Image (spheres, rainbow, N blue to C red):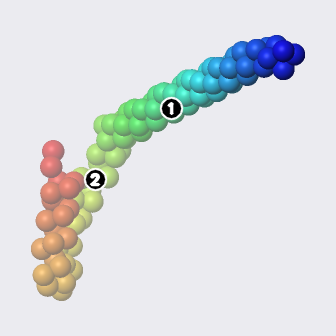
Amino acid sequence: MVSGFVLSAIIPFAVISVIAEQMAADSLQESNMAILEAANQAKSHELSAYFTTIEKQAVTTALNPVTQDAVNLFDQTFSEQSYFLGNLGDDRVAVENYWRNQFGQE
């Protein structure tokens, strides 16, 4: 009889303990996921802001008259020095095409 009384007290306690442990584990997992998602969003925002800053700096540099003058002078010098590229054979055409296609467009 005493053992039946002890078992009837221990079994509900054990069930409640298992349920409480599972609830605590689920709560910790949800909390950790929320923290990771917040960190992910923060890093994503940081990265987007960084690339926006770099893009603005590139546009500002490209619009700078000094930069434009330098590019124009480089293009002019490149054309004037084409005799040097004549010694390169097939590489001459590749270098010239690369320059014109990448940087010569306005």
Residue at 20% in and 62% down = 99
Q: Is residue 100 left or right of residue 29?
A: left
What number is the disc on residue 105? none
Is residue 33 depicted above or below 64 in this figure?
above
Gap in angstroms between the C-alphas marked 2 and 1: 40 Å
The percent position of residue 1, horizontal first and vertical second, equals: 84, 15
What number is the disc on residue 71? 2
Residue at 15% in and 59% down = 100
Residue 75 in which image quadrant: bottom left
Q: Is residue 8 left or right of residue 72?
A: right
The percent position of residue 43, horizontal first and vertical second, equals: 51, 33
Q: Nearer the viewer, residue 14 or 25?
A: 14
Q: Which residue is mark 1?
A: 40
Of pointers 2 and 1, the one earlier in the residue sequence: 1
Residue, far right: 2
Residue at 16% in and 68% down = 96
Residue type of the residue flagged with mark 2: Val
Query: Within 10 Å of the Cα at label 1, are there few (<14), some (14-19), or many (20+) other Cα atoms?
Result: few
Residue 10 in which image quadrant: top right
Mark nearer the viewer, 2 or 1 = 1
Is residue 59 depicted above or below 91 in this figure?
above
The percent position of residue 58, horizontal first and vertical second, equals: 36, 40
Residue 36 in which image quadrant: top right
Task: Label 2: state its secondary structure.
Answer: helix
Screen quadrant of the C terminus: top left
Q: Nearer the viewer, residue 43 or 55?
A: 43
Residue type of the residue flagged with mark 1: Asn
Task: Label 1: state its secondary structure.
Answer: helix
Residue at 16% in and 77% down = 92
From this viewpoint, is residue 64 visible?
no
